[in-house]
Amino acid sequence: MKKLQVLLLSAALLSFSACNKKKVATLERELALKDEQIGQLEEQLNLAQSTQSSLLDRMADLSVVNKDGAESIKKSLENITQQYSFIQDLTTKIQSKDSLNLALVMNLKRSLSNINDEDIQVEVKGGFVHVSISDKLLFQSGSSRINQAAYSVLGKIATVVNDHDDMNLMVEGHTDD
């Protein structure tokens, strides 16, 4: 009986052991598959972490670039604003000076209204009030001496100009020689 028991026990162990070998082999295959999946997932994780690190570095670089760009744009806008203000001031001053020059021209024309328009011209040129007196009015033909009628005209011009000492005035006349 003991032999039978040992024989039965041995047969049971053998069948159990054959069954276990199949299960062990199946489990080992599953384990190898899981190890392979873990390896792939670790590679994906490493790649994702590397990508994240790279993106964070790029974001930091872009942040610095954006900050520098914003500072540069801000400085440019400040410069443009200053230049615009300067140009506005100049424009205002030029308009004011032009208005004063036109007023001076009108005063000169009024004071010289009794003189022939062909003999004297008063206009604004390049920011100056320009008075051009003909050679017939200033000089006798062939002479370089100013005649008496010209002194009267120059006196009228001087009277008007003395009231506007901050103005730029040019009086021009030529002899016929």
Image (tube, rainbow, N blue to C red):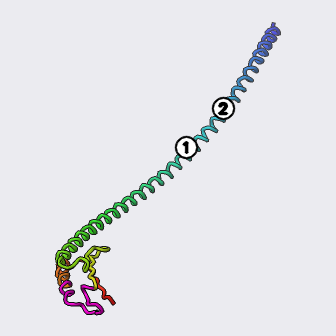
Residue with the mark numbered 2 = 37
Which residue: 48% across, 54% down? 65
Relative vertical location of residue 89 with respect to residue 108 in this rendering, above or below: above
Residue with the mark numbered 1 = 52
Which residue: 27% across, 83% down? 134
Q: In the rendering, which numbered label is found on residue 9?
A: none
In space, the residues marked 2 and 1 are separated at their CA atoms by: 22 Å
| The N terminus lies in quadrant | top right
Residue 29 place in picture, x, y as percent: 72, 26
Within-10-Å neighbours for mark 1: few <14, some 14–19, many 20+: few
Residue 150 in the magenta stretch? The answer is yes
Mark 2: which amino acid?
Answer: Gln
Q: Nearer the viewer, residue 87 or 134?
A: 134
Residue 40 place in picture, x, y as percent: 65, 35
Seen in the image, is 21 located left or right of residue 102?
right
Seen in the image, is 42 located left or right of residue 28?
left
Mark 1: which amino acid?
Answer: Gln
Q: Nearer the viewer, residue 170 or 113?
A: 113
Residue 84 place in picture, x, y as percent: 33, 62
Mark 1: secondary structure: helix
Relative vertical location of residue 58 with respect to residue 3 in this rendering, above or below: below
Relative vertical location of residue 170 with respect to residue 18 in this rendering, above or below: below
Which is more foreground, mark 2 or mark 1? 1
Residue range (magenta): 136-153
